[in-house]
Image (cartoon, rainbow, N blue to C red):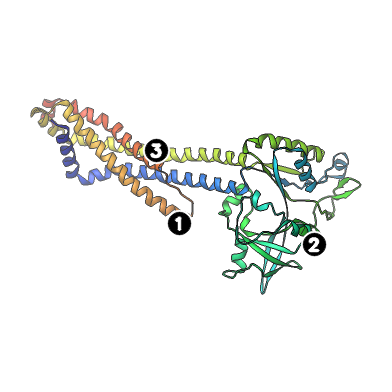
Amino acid sequence: MKKSEILVISLTELKSNKLRTALTMLGIVFGVAAVIAMMSIGEGARQETIEQIELMGTNNIIINKVIIKQKTKEAKTSFSPGLSTKDADAILEINPYVQMIVPQREIKNNLTYRSNIIEARIIGTTPDYLKVMNSKLESGKFFQPYDVTNAANVCVLGSGIKEQIFKFENPVGKKIKLGDLWFDILGIVASKNITASSAEGLGIRNFNEDIYVPFTTMAYKMDKLEEQSEFRNGIFYFIESQEVPILDKTSVDQLIIKINDSENLKQASQLISRIMERKHFGVMDYEITLPEQLLEQKQKTQKIFNIVMGAIAGISLLVGGIGIMNIMLANILERTKEIGIRKSLGATRSDLLYQFMYEAMIISLTGGLVGIVVGFMLTSIITSYAEWRTIITPFSVFLAFFVSAAVGMGFGIYPAKKAADKDPIESLRYE
């Protein structure tokens, strides 16, 4: 018998039992849909992590200030001047891999515009900030070196602050009050795609909510008080009853160091670590972070997460395959007399083997196609209601469909073989 004729017989048999076919198919449908949905969640999270890390600059090394409260006896034997622009000067002078360094100093103060008053985060930095952080301007311009030299009262707003205060109004050229000082708005930094959960997970701030002013303006006019130990005669002292606020014009909260080539990141970070250790006399009042290493760590965690989710989705396909085998075994038992009649009329063992294999294959392939559609719908629902980022890749669709076909074929072999091996005389006697 021709294989095309066997295929027609298989399709006719499945059509005559539509409900049973549909129920058998359900396991494969939900298995494929689960694989696509799970992999889309994993890929969305991976892509989001990469984008958030890129906000920090993959060629950057970041040094953050760490507050260490030392008691007097400990402070006498070890002391540190704290993170400052002097560290930046030393790194630039010694480290050949460094392209540029941007200091950052941060305070929170009131922003006043007309009747609007909000608490805003103000960042004191330099004109190289945009280059180092791969940021762009939405409108206007960033402050220039002469603004830093003159400690000018100028500022640049993050897109989030602009939307919150000015809405549809163009803020460039207008004045706002930061604390007790008036500032001219020079420009708006373009929005960066960052979520609150990602910012919290990676330990970075929402850059869209920043206001940028020249570093010297922050240091000399905005009078930032350092809540650290008291500095006397070259030693930091911690007074247990109170923290003595001091004013240090060179102190910074963060140094962002741009390396000339990503291949030099490891060597550059090792050299920076040695410089910082020497300048801070072994006191770890700073923390060195490499966004590239942070990315590798996050991707490793994400890979484990994807494997676990894939395994859970794979179990659904396995259950679907077992369902196909069970229903087909019951189907063979129900059609025992039919098998006997077909064999007595000349059907060969291979004819019956192909017939039942075709039935299993049709169920699994059709279930796979329907599962793909359901998977796309499920992913859309997850994106809409859970507000998770999801990305469906061609690989995830191909993998889910391939596995569904393999499951159907794999679990269809045993029932097909059992049907083909039945004795025709015993089959005809079966009631």
Query: SS for tag 1?
Result: helix
Provide the residue designation for mark 2. 221
Q: Is residue 367 left or right of residue 115?
A: left
Sequence order check, earlier mark of 3 and 2: 2
Q: In front of the other: label 1 or label 2? A: 2
Q: Is residue 387 left or right of residue 100?
A: left
Helix, strand, or loop for circle 3? helix
- Residue picked out by circle 1: 385
Residue indicated by mark 3: 315
Q: Is residue 196 above or below residue 35?
A: below
Residue type pointed to by label 2: Lys
Whether residues under marks 3 and 2 lie with C-beta atoms below 8 angstroms apart, the answer is no
Q: What type is the residue that disc 3 sits on?
A: Ile
Of 315 and 215, the residue lying toward us: 215
Q: For the residue marked with disc 1, what is the amino acid? A: Tyr
The disc, 1 or 2, on the residue closer to the chain's N-terminal end is 2
